[in-house]
Image (cartoon, helix red, strand yellow):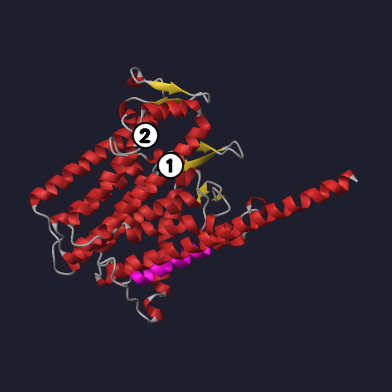
Amino acid sequence: MDITRKRTLNQPTDKAEKASTDDDNTATSKSAVFFTLFFTSWIFVIVEKCIKGNWSIIAVPRFPSDVNSYIEIKTFAILTVWFVLQCILYMLPFGGELVDGLQIKESRIRLKYRLNAFFVLTANIIGFLIALLSGIRVTSVFDKLLQMTTSGVLLILLSSIVLYLRGSKSDKTGNGFNDWFNGVELNPRWGLFDLKYVCFRSGIIGWILMNFINIAKAFDNGDKPSVTLLTVAGFQLLYVADYFWFEDGILVSRDIVHEHLGYNLLVQFLMIPFCFAVQTRYLMMTKCELPWYCLLAVIILNLIGYWIYRGSNSEKNNFRKNPNDPQFANYEVIPTLTGKNLLVSGWWGICRHPNYLGDLIISLTYALPTGFSYFLPYLNPLFLFVMLVGRERTDGDECRKRYGEAWETYCHRVKYRIIPYVY
């Protein structure tokens, strides 16, 4: 009697829980569908505007109706071969040391990474210059940008399907579309080869090569690249070179540590070369040139942003490696129950994410040289701001759970999240 009654009482609850789970899965699927379409479509929209010089955001993009304008086997092959070369360069036993990444909670092991991104970036630039001087028409990428975009989407689509099929059944949620979109594995690997890490680096290297192509295209058009164009390309090269020189900082980034590799993350990596090179493309096509005093002001602002970005990141990384270093002797910290200390001096006493502040200033200096005729070149700084605000909120919630009262004390001491006296 009691057992029967218990089952009867539980049935509505079980049904309610199942209905709630089904509703959650449906909502998640709809969200995944939306972002799949949005991210993919957004790349094509940006590329269309770059091809036609249609810089207005509100202008409706006009895509060609000819299938050959989108798909070309040769272009797909070239992009695939280039990515395979990036994989080979990563696996070379030189160019950088082999180090341990963060410990994976589930397996209690540390994955090893080859820190040779700066070497690989240099090899790509040298290879580009050799091809250019050898008479190879590297600017054909400029003319086939739409085919290159389609090839990239097809490549990551195939990769995401393989990753889904490769994922173990125990790691899947049961919702096939969401598992494909969000990814099943955190670190898909074959021995020392880490696919997520190589894809991430390749997207950034592709961004720099796109800038070089835009500069080369200016010569093809019979023009000399403007000082403004070269300055913005130099800003971005410096940022990436710095990012790769201090490559060990990448190993603790959210994308590497927390994000599973599926279509969602892959399409974000694909956006980097096609969407981040908008400013240099705009400057090349419009021949926009800033007065020297305006350009000098932008250069100074960029250096200030770089000073904040590099100083805060180096301080954080050095403190993480050795909190007992003499340079931190006079720094104030807040101890936590986990044994870690929260830094409330130096850069990290000014705001909770001074590195984000530096990043935002640097990103803004990429757009300022384009002037104020169109807002499109400013979309990247805007998206970065939205992303960093969301990331700061997520980091804050995680730290609150991890450090408890110590984090509340830290937030009371360091009131501003990213921008001192503003936010």
Q: Residues within 10 Å of mark 2 (few under 14, many from 20)?
A: many
123 left or right of 12 in image: left
**Is any part of residue 127 visible from this angle?**
no
Cα gap from disc 2 to disc 1, whole angstroms = 11 Å
Residue 74 position within the rendered picture, expressed as x and y whole percent measured from the top left: 40, 73
Instruction: Point out which mark residue 50 bears.
Output: none
In the rendered view, does 172 fall on the left or right side of 361? right
Magenta residues span 145-159
Residue at position x 32%, y 73% in the image: 61
* Closer to us: 236 or 122: 236
Q: Please state the horizontal and vertical placement of residue 153, each as a whole percent of the image.
A: 44, 66
Q: Which residue is the site of mark 2? A: 352
Residue at image coords 22%, 39%? 304
Classed neighbour count for the residue bearing mark 1: other residues with Cα under 10 Å, few (<14), some (14–19), many (≥20): few
Q: Earlier in the sequence, mark 2 or mark 1?
A: 2
Check the image and report above or below for 396 versus 365: above
